[in-house]
Amino acid sequence: MLKWTAVFLVIALVAAIFGFGGVAEAAASIAKVIFFIFIALVVITGIIGFTAINKK
């Protein structure tokens, strides 16, 4: 998932360099959403893993 964030970030940067404002804005917002979903999944997985270790 972090790979897709990087891909959309690169698309946004290239589009911004060539002057495609709408495309750059859309790609940047997609990258931002995917990044926050990734962070949320990391936190949730960490919490689940921490509670599973402590139940042993």
Image (cartoon, helix red, strand yellow):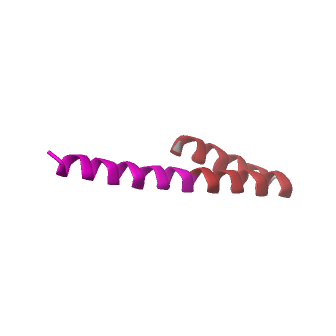
Question: Residue placed at 20% from the left, 47% from the top?
Answer: 53
Q: Is residue 37 left or right of residue 44?
A: right
Residue interval drawn in magenta:
35-56
Quarter of image, res 32: bottom right
Chief SS of the magenta region:
helix
Magenta-colored stretch includes residue 2: no
Magenta-colored stretch includes residue 36: yes
Question: Residue placed at 53% from the left, 42% from the top?
Answer: 1
Residue in the foreground of this view, choosing between 41 and 16: 41
Residue in the foreground of this view, choosing between 34 and 50: 50
Residue in the foreground of this view, choosing between 37 and 50: 50
Question: Residue placed at 40% from the left, 55% from the top?
Answer: 43
Q: Position of residue 48 (x, y in %)?
A: 33, 49
Q: Is residue 11 left or right of residue 4?
A: right
Q: Position of residue 46 (x, y in %)?
A: 34, 52
* Residue 19 visible: no
Q: Quadrant of the C terminus?
A: top left
Q: Is residue 35 left or right of residue 53?
A: right
